[in-house]
């Protein structure tokens, strides 16, 4: 809350102290005063600064005028500070755990491969294979019954799986 008040104060101060843009028409009040009639800026930056200083001194004297409100505000500020501290600790612990987990994963990946080995764990994993007796066949068997066995006939000439090279004449 105090952060927002500080930001608002400093932004207001910066906007007041910025030079006016030439050619920009200021909205005229209902009852024009002497400064609006003469074309000068309605508020001098030094007057605004002195007004801000007097507002700050008035705010410092608030606790003298309203001690009960000041005490309640102090308790609220203490409670908010405690909650903010607990939230910051929780956030830091979470971030620390995430960093530790990432470091552990990197070290695990680095230790998975031997120093001279260029293959990664993904390269070493086996390729995908279809299920042997499961999947759709098992599901179809429960619906339609077991498959009918085809008659066992051997091919007339069995060809080798791998062609052999031709023989040399002797």
Image: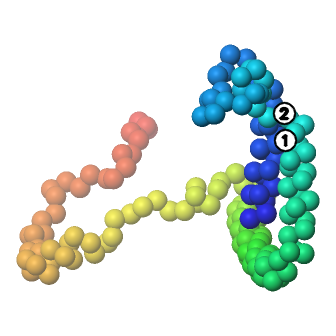
Question: On residue 7, which mark appears?
Answer: none
Q: Could you say which is closer to the camera, residue 65 or residue 52?
A: 65
The correct choice, above or below, for 62 with respect to 10 in the image is below
Q: Could you say which is closer to the camera, residue 14 or residue 132?
A: 14
The correct choice, above or below, for 109 with respect to 132 in the image is above
| Residue plotted at (78% across, 79% down) | 69
Q: Write down the quadrant of residue 41 in the picture.
A: top right
| Residue plotted at (42% across, 61% down) | 128
Q: Write down the quadrant of residue 115 in the picture.
A: bottom right
**Picture coordinates of residue 78 (x, y %)?**
82, 79
| Residue plotted at (7% across, 77% down) | 144
Mark 1 near mark 2, Cβ–Cβ under 8 Å?
yes
Query: How many numbered circles does the render carry?
Result: 2
Local SS, label 2 = loop
Q: Could you say which is closer to the camera, residue 88 or residue 166?
A: 88
Is any part of residue 14 visible from this angle? yes
Q: Write down the quadrant of residue 76 in the picture.
A: bottom right
**Picture coordinates of residue 154 (x, y %)?**
16, 63
Task: From the image, tell me which residue sits under label 2.
Answer: 44
Task: From the image, tell me which residue sits under label 1.
Answer: 48
**Picture coordinates of residue 131 (x, y %)?**
33, 70
- Left or right of 91? Residue 130 is left
Local SS, label 1 = helix
User: Label 2 crowding class (10 Å Cα cut-off): few <14, some 14-19, many 20+?
Assistant: few
| Quarter of the image where the C terminus is located | top left
Is any part of residue 107 visible from this angle? no
């Amino acid at each position: 809350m105090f952060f927002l008040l500080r930001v608002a104060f400093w932004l207001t101060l910066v906007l007041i102290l910025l030079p006016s843009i030439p050619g920009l028409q200021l909205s005229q009040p209902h009852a024009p005063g002497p400064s609006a009639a003469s074309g000068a800026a309605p508020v001098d930056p030094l007057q605004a600064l002195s007004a801000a200083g007097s507002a700050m001194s008035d705010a410092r004297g608030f606790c003298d005028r309203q001690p009960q409100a000041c005490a309640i505000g102090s308790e609220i500020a203490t409670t908010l500070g405690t909650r903010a501290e607990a939230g910051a600790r929780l956030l830091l612990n979470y971030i620390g755990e995430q960093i530790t987990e990432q470091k552990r994963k990197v070290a695990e990946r680095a230790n998975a491969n031997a120093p001279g080995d260029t293959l990664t764990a993904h390269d070493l994993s086996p390729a995908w294979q279809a299920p042997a007796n499961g999947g759709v066949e098992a599901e179809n068997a429960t619906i339609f019954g077991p498959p009918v066995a085809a008659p066992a006939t051997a091919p007339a000439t069995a060809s080798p799986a791998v062609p052999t090279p031709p023989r040399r004449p002797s």
